[in-house]
Amino acid sequence: MLEVRDIHVEVEIRRRRLKVIDGVSLSLARGETLGIVGESGAGKSMLGNAIAGMLEPPLHIAGGSVTLEGRRIDDLKGEELRAVRGRRIGMVFQDPLTSLNPLFSIGDQLVETITTRLGIGRAEARRRAIALLEATGLPDPAERLGHYPHQFSGGMRQRVVLALALCLDPVLVIADEPTTALDVSVQAQIIRLLDRLCREHGSAVILITHDMGVIAEATERVAVMYAGRIVEIGPTERVIRAPRHPYTRGLMASIPPIDRRPDRLAQIAGSMPRIGTVLPGCPFSPRCPSAVARCHEAIPALAGGNGHLAACWLDEAAS
Amino acid sequence: MTRLLPFMLYRLGQGVLVMLVVAFISFSLFTHVGDPINNMLGEEVDETYREQLREDLGLNDPVPVRFIRFVGNAVQGEFGVSYRNSIPVAQLFGERLPATLELVFAAAVIALALGIPAGVYAAIHRSRPSAQVIQILSLIGISLPTFVTGILLIYVFSISLDLLPSFGRGEVVDLGWWSTGFLTASGLKALVLPAVTLALFQLTLIMRLVRSEMLEVLRTDYIRFARARGLPDRLIHFRHAVRNTLVPVITITGLQIGSLVAFAIITETVFQWPGMGLLFIQAVQFVDIPVMSAYLVLIAFFFVVINFIVDILYHAVDPRLSGTLSDGSGKGMP
Amino acid sequence: MTSQHPAGQARRLLRPVARLWQSDLVWSFRNTPYAVVSLALVLAIAVTALCAHWVAPHDPFDLASFNILDSELPPAWVEGGSPEFILGTDTQGRDVLSLIIYGARLSLLVGLASVVFGLVLGVGLGLLSGYVGGWVDALVMRTADVKLSFPAILVALLVNGVARGFLPPEMHGQIAIPVLIFSIGMSGWVHYARTVRGIVMVERRKEYVLAAQIVGRKGWEVALLHVLPNTMSPVTVIATINLATAILLEATLSFLGVGVPPTEPSLGTLIKVGSEYMFSGIWWVTAFPSLLLVVLVLAVNLLGDWLRDALNPNLQ
């Protein structure tokens, strides 16, 4: 249903042209849930924005294509692009407080979206809005339509944001760190809610997060990103149980196990190369504990069978 | 919710404090400069009579007593007699105030009616050449001193084209407590150049502020989320963004109206407009202490009131701050 | 990246200086034509004005050098003009070009002095406010709030008026310029103070300050070393925009007759004196100083605008 092919995103700042996404390809089936995981700055959000056509200048797509339900959408502009937004692709941003316009009641924002995009009357739109809020588990939705965003708690606000993202029945929802700004106690609830709502609406989901726990809980497949590239992609269970890229292994080691209190968490030494740093070899090689000479010389491509691919010279699939 | 009340009380207290400081400066001016007896009687009068008068007027009382008396008088609008005009300051102000307020009103209408739309336009279409032209014009606008604008307009419209008068208020209609130039053709004609002059600088400032504020709003998450829902640009710009832009703009606009009163001093000097500003400038030049200190107190009062009104408006516009709307924030916690 | 250790201090201290002169800024400058033109104009005006004594064709202070017979001559290219007086002469026969060169000198000097005064006061108060905190901070910041709600021109006028009120009239002439600098400086300190205070607040919470305190060094000493370089970019931008405002304020106050004494040529007094003769058709005495003033202020404003964008960390 969604086909991203060799997408490149660049930004020109002053006289420099920086690569933010460097040739990412992935595909998504109808109703499937794909996680994208990585450190901040790995290009996860950029990838989400590039797919949704939400890149802000000076960021732009410099190559590759995005196809949704057989139609190319990466080169759309103006009205055509607007027709895709919300209606085909819904988005959920990180902070529900800043995602909602503080000066409009939540009902106003929902009804406005439904009436302008679906061309139905206000009364009908209002009924839909109430039904949607009800489905998100917001108590007394009819009464709370008139309330302003600041009158809700963080978790409740994110429910409203989910209702807004799903109110036009999109085939794909891109959720960019939907729980990061929330209280730990409601994070799991929101993730489960996102999962359930998207299943009910038949929407596929791209869930962007830096939290491996969230990935394990809510996704069927996962793509691990590092420095603007996918370094490993495959079924979530297999990637977690048998990671093939040293970076993924590092990420796994940094999750606290649930059953016992660890003495200390493993940490990946060093930090990701700055955007714009061009390395001849694998971008992870400077931090890689098991890097060999070859790793510093050439960039490995994604390889592997059974839908589980990794980009590493040390992985047997590559050699 | 009662968050509003303590805030208002706090601002009110702050305002009173500012007024007291200004009143003290003003009072010090009075006591420091010259001997008011000399001003009233001249130098030839007999010393015992002077002493008598000094005692009668309470000039020998301790400073705090005199300050309290000064504040008491000021509250009643009593500032003494102008050294230069030999008229009570209150009466002088009564005559001059309508001229200034009418000028400021006309200029504010021009500045807001053109400045806000221009700023919104320049923000929405910031990469269009027309918006960049507006931006360049606005920089020229803030680099043009008010008096140069005034002189230029006088040269073009009064001297070269002989279309509009270059000084004075024209004919005014006396309404008893207020003299207005709005009701006569010559009054309105006389108003054009000063009002445009006064408006121009503020117009460019308002335009620039609205533009940068709007650009800020256009970068926010809720505007991005609105775009991500495919709402039409028209709705995003004029419904969502403009409303959010106007919240801070209200504050700025209030302060701009205050600025207009200050800049009126220059405009009134250029156009010999018989208002408070011209009076004040003449008072500074002649060191006419009663008029200066009264103006000081009055203008400070004016600014304190404006700031207070702006605070209230701010709370009325923004639902996050208006206490009456928040009744359910404790409800429905997850 | 908040973990610095004191050893890297010297480098850190120099880094913002290097950043300021780093090629990015220079590159941006070279690629912004209006910035180049503005800087060239400002420098040309400043150099000409400072060398007034050698550059100006006539000396407007030398009574013997001008002749009443040469009075009211229009600019050289207008009929009746003389090539000796390119921009014409005023009612006393003084050369307008020389007048505006000397006028620009006084305007620039007063403007610069006021900026320096406002900057020192503002940065000082900002540092004090940020480090001491508590009631000092509250006092400074509330004063700043109040000050900010009054327009600069009004503050300058009121400070000026009050100063005149307190000083005996016979002193007004000689202290006019210091009073002017004081009143313009007083109207501009708030932006520096707020910016510097903000930076201090951020820096003093950083780990290296705490670390330095633990090893027995005074936290503020360490932080000061870091804060001052960090304030350079914003303070430069504020000072540039402030210079435009200060020049405008000087001209305005002089025009209103409460700034520079009328006997001294500043751009403001020249425009004021000239505007009185405008009705008799002598437009050039007021037009040229006005033009120079507007060009100067516009150039400084453009420079400030460019600097603000070029040094904006969000765009880097």
Image (spheres, coloured by chain):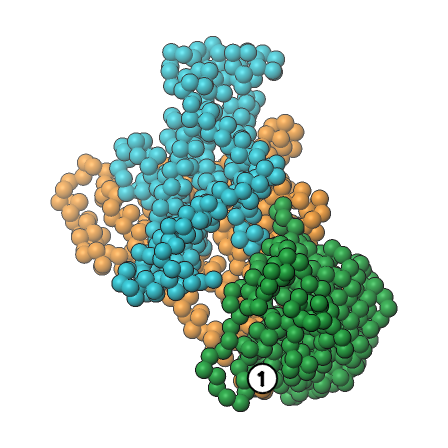
Chain colours: A green, B orange, C cyan
Q: Return the chain for callout 1.
A: A
The residue sitting at 52% across, 48% down in the picture is C311
- Counting from the top left corner in percent of width and height, residue B109 is at 61, 51
User: Extreme right residue here?
Assistant: A70
User: Is C305 positioned to the left or the right of B125 in the image?
Assistant: left
Q: Which residue is mark 1?
A: A186
The residue sitting at 35% across, 46% down in the picture is C120
Image quarter of the C terminus of chain B: bottom right
- Counting from the top left corner in percent of width and height, residue A250 is at 57, 73
- Counting from the top left corner in percent of width and height, residue A59 is at 68, 56
Camera-nearest residue between C34 and A243: A243
The residue sitting at 74% across, 81% down in the picture is A198
Q: Is residue B302 above or below residue B185?
A: below
- Counting from the top left corner in percent of width and height, residue A225 is at 65, 68
Instruction: Answer yes or no: is residue C41 visible.
Output: yes
The residue sitting at 33% across, 39% down in the picture is C179
Residue B72 location, quadrant: bottom left
